[in-house]
Amino acid sequence: MEEKDVKKIVRESYGKIAERSSSCCVPTSSCCGSDTYYENISKTIGYTDEDLKSVPEGANLGLGCGNPVALASLKEGDHVLDLGSGAGFDCFLAANKVGKSGKVIGVDMTASMIDKARENARKENFDNVEFRLGEIENLPAADNSVDVIISNCVINLSPEKERVFREAFRVLKPGGRLMVSDIVLLKELPEFIKNNSAVYVSCVAGAVLKKQYIEFIKEAGFQGVDILGESSFTIDLLVNQHSEKGVIKDLNNTIQSIKIQAIKPN
């Protein structure tokens, strides 16, 4: 698919998620996904009961494949940027850790997600969180301005992953850290799957080989690139339509969830 087509498909799909509060990256229930359902999904990928209780209602849409905030070792006063912030779930968790002296910026290209996140912040008085409309390939943030960048199952959706990591490198302060949870591949996908729009927004078709993903990070200038955790991801956790499960039912050993950290050198 063309880059412009990919972005349009992703923007429209995640706009619908924001409006109906259901998920593309995980299956939805028959009632379009309950809070309990999303909580159960989140617990399977690394969130705790305390995490889930500490964010505004409606912030957790069941999107993600890990808990980058848990990996980031955030401290009081840190400035954090979240790539693809959605309704703000990880941003609010980060905000609780950096405190009033810190700041969290969420960037998302879907206007309805930004509106939803801002409303979540307003109703729970999260004054240290800001949400900006923008693309992660062209971040609306200054050079050398944040201490930590987090991202959760979003970079795989970008058709320009190399540029995403270059932008992350640009806005991080020297010594700053990148903490990412994402989906990668252990072998190439068939072309008919790569060109399937429904599979693309299900966080599968846009993913690249794990080796290539790590090379993109290194080529952007990062050092200390380290995989902190990895696990197989089953189709049931990735695709929410029975028809699409049938298309990629034999790929359970191809898709992997990884947790990566990297450092911008001083």
Image: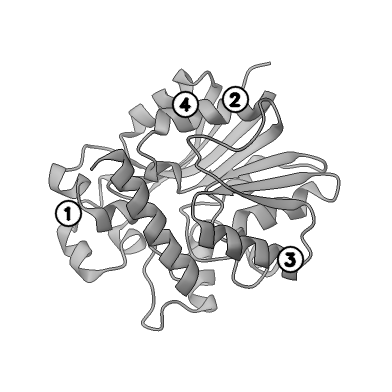
Find the residue positioned furthest to the right: 101
> Which sits earlier in the primary sequence, circle 4 or circle 3?
3
- What is the number of the mark on residue 217? 4
Say what amino acid the circle numbered 2 marks. Answer: Arg
Residue 58 on image: x %, y %? 59, 71
Of the residues tagged 1 and 3, which is closer to the observer? Answer: 3
Give the residue type at disc 1: Asp
Who's the residue at 27% across and 47% down the image? 205
Mark 3 residue element: helix
Which residue is at 80% across, 44% downward? 102
Q: Position of residue 238 (x, y in %)?
A: 34, 59
Q: What's the CA distance linking mark 1 and mark 3?
A: 44 Å
**Foreground: disc 4 or disc 1:** 4
Q: Is residue 25 visible?
A: no
Q: Which residue is mark 1?
A: 250
Q: Earlier in the sequence, mark 4 or mark 1?
A: 4
Q: Secondary structure at mark 1?
A: loop
Asked if the residues shown at circle 4 and circle 3 are in contact, with their CB atoms under 8 angstroms apart, the answer is no
Precedes in sequence: disc 4 or disc 2:
2
Say if 166 sits above or below 99 in the image: above
User: In which quadrant will I find the C terminus?
Assistant: top right
* Residue 60 circle label: none
Determine contact: label 4, label 1, CB under 8 Å.
no
Q: N-terminal of the two: label 3 or label 2?
A: 3
* Residue kind at label 4, given as amino acid type: Ile
Badge 2: how crowded within 10 Å, few (<14), some, or many (20+)? many
- Residue 101 located left or right of residue 23: right
Question: At 68% across and 57% down in the image, what residue appears?
Answer: 92
Q: Which residue is mark 2?
A: 170
Q: Earlier in the sequence, mark 1 or mark 3?
A: 3
Q: Which residue is mark 3?
A: 122
Q: Quadrant of residue 250?
A: bottom left
